[in-house]
Image (tube, helix red, strand yellow):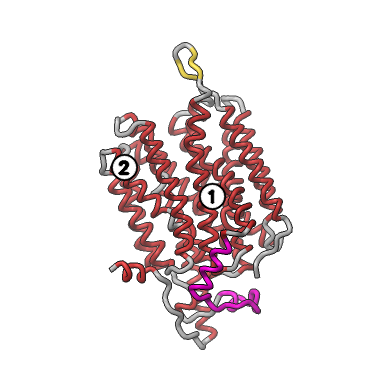
């Protein structure tokens, strides 16, 4: 039973190569378009089923459903299991039928959200969100594996960046649409609405995603695009694949980029977790204003930052990612500084800072959380590369929850019976992370892509 279940998710056998070049071209291009559009939309909806808890925290506390401490435990549980799940599922993605693997994960995550919306007990919430963390961890690595299967080295950066922009769509949808659901129908709608939407999208992905090109009688993408034509395009055996995956774990490149990505993710999720609270306490924004500001800034500026990163590095730097990565790192440092230093009442400065933050995060997610490392390793281990980076990134993302809470709690003072929060320590923590994250990739300045 278990063996048959696992076999269902394995990549299919190679079919005999098609003879008709015209048929190969038509089928390849149709599949490529279907894959990239499906990955962008599908991965965006993964976020819809993950960040819903961020929107519903206030109403759930007010309704007495969970305390702030319990919400922190539930949110942290997702992040930690997500980190380890990204690593394990990244290794599995190198062997998987991406169409089935990714679609099933979104469908199951949708069901978990629906169950969460009908639940009432803390331990049920904890168990469901723990499971959701594992299912959510299946979204990223399979997406990148599929991109590398269908797009070659000299075009990968642009497509990767377009796909990476999906997180901006997902985050923006969550903060804006889910906030509206919660405002109209209560906290349960913040889970039931995303759950129903992701059920529909998951069923669509079952039809529009694809397995490897060779399972359709198509040549390897390197041969199809004449990209590195002397490269070996035969799929490795299971033993060879495991040896290649182990080599990822011992490479200094993955450790350098993993640490850089982890520090960037500490900034990213730090602002997502505590940014609305900061805007409300220090800048005087309402709940709807703070959520909408971060959500709207994430959609367009973040999408532009992600999309431009791959296109610019492909078009103007011949797929060399280091220079634009440094630029995005400097923008992140400037954005965090402006957000903290802008005095209350300057909404334009606040919005500019958040837009610059989202723009920089969009590009850095492309470079540090995947594309640079994918360039440095064989295409057969793309999933393992993404999995290891995900482990670094989301351990940091989960840790920033309690680090941020401690820094804020230990800086609070009581003035005339009211709590006054000092956010200087947490901003210094974020800025320190941003600076080191920008410096670390410089150690790979002369590293060459794998051919």
Q: Residues within 10 Å of mark 1 (few under 14, many from 20)?
A: many
Residue in front for this viewpoint, 386 or 26: 386
In the image, taking residue 94 as reference, residue 4 lies left or right, namely left
Q: Nearer the viewer, residue 122 or 415?
A: 122
Disc nearest the viewer among 2 and 1: 1
Query: What residue is shown at x 34% (from left), y 53% (from top)?
Result: 110
Residue that mark 1 sits on: 392
Q: Position of residue 87 (x, y in %)?
A: 48, 56
Q: Is residue 229 magenta?
A: yes
Q: Secondary structure at mark 1?
A: helix
Q: Residues within 10 Å of mark 2 (few under 14, many from 20)?
A: many
Q: Which residue: 39% across, 38% down?
A: 73
Secondary structure under the numbered disc 2 in the rendered image: helix
Extreme residue toward the right, this view: 446
Dot 2 and dot 1 residues touching (CB under 8 Å): no
Residue 305 visible at all: no
Q: Earlier in the sequence, mark 2 or mark 1?
A: 2
Q: Which residue is mark 2?
A: 125
- Observer-nearest residue: 290 or 81? 81
Residue 381, relative to residue 418: is it above or below? below
Q: Position of residue 21 (x, y in %)?
A: 54, 85
- Label 2 and label 1: CA atoms lie apart by 26 Å
- Give the magenta-colored segment's residue range: 221-248
Q: Quadrant of the C terminus?
A: bottom right
In the image: residue 276, left or right of residue 196: right
Left or right, 185 with reference to 172 = left
Q: Position of residue 91 (x, y in %)?
A: 48, 62
Q: Is residue 298 magenta?
A: no
Near-viewer residue (83 or 368): 83
């Amino acid at each position: 039973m278990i063996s048959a279940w696992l076999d269902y998710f394995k990549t299919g056998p190679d079919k005999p190569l098609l003879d008709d070049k015209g048929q190969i071209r038509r089928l390849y291009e149709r599949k490529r378009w279907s894959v990239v559009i499906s990955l962008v939309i599908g991965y965006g909806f993964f976020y819809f089923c993950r960040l819903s808890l961020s929107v519903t925290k206030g109403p759930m506390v007010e309704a007495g459903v969970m305390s702030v401490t319990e919400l922190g435990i539930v949110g942290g549980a997702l992040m930690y299991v997500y980190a380890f799940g990204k690593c394990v599922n990244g290794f599995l993605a190198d062997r998987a039928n991406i169409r089935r693997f990714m679609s099933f994960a979104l469908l199951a995550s949708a069901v978990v959200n629906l169950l969460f919306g009908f639940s009432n007990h803390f331990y049920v919430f904890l168990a469901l969100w723990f499971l959701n963390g594992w299912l959510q961890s299946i979204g990223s690595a399979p997406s990148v594996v599929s991109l590398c299967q269908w797009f070659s080295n000299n075009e990968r950066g642009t497509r990767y960046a377009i796909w990476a922009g999906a997180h901006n769509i997902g985050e923006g949808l969550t903060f804006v649409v889910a906030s509206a659901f919660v405002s109209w129908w209560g906290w349960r709608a913040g889970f039931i609405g995303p759950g129903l939407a992701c059920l529909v999208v998951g069923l669509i992905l079952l039809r529009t995603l694809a397995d490897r090109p060779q399972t359709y009688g198509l040549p390897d993408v390197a041969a199809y695009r004449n990209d590195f034509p002397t490269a070996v395009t035969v799929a490795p055996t299971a033993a060879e694949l495991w040896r290649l995956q182990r080599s990822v774990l011992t490479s200094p490149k993955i450790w350098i980029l993993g640490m850089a990505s982890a520090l960037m993710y500490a900034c990213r999720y730090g602002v997502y977790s505590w940014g609305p609270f900061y805007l409300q306490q220090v800048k005087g924004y309402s709940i709807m204003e703070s959520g909408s500001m971060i959500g709207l800034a994430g959609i367009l500026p973040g999408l532009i930052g992600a999309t431009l990163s791959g296109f610019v590095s492909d078009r103007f730097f011949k797929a060399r990612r280091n220079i634009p990565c440094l630029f995005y790192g400097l923008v992140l440092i400037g954005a965090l500084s402006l957000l903290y230093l802008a005095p209350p009442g300057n909404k334009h400065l606040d919005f500019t800072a958040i837009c610059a933050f989202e723009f920089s995060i969009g590009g850095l997610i492309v470079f540090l959380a995947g594309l640079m490392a994918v360039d440095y390793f064989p295409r057969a281990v793309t999933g393992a590369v993404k999995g290891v980076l995900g482990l670094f990134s989301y351990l940091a993302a989960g840790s920033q929850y309690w680090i941020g809470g401690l820094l804020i709690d230990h800086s609070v003072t009581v003035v005339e019976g009211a709590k006054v929060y000092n956010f200087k320590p947490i901003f210094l923590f974020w800025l320190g992370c941003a600076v080191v994250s920008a410096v670390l990739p410089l150690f790979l300045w002369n590293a060459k892509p794998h051919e």
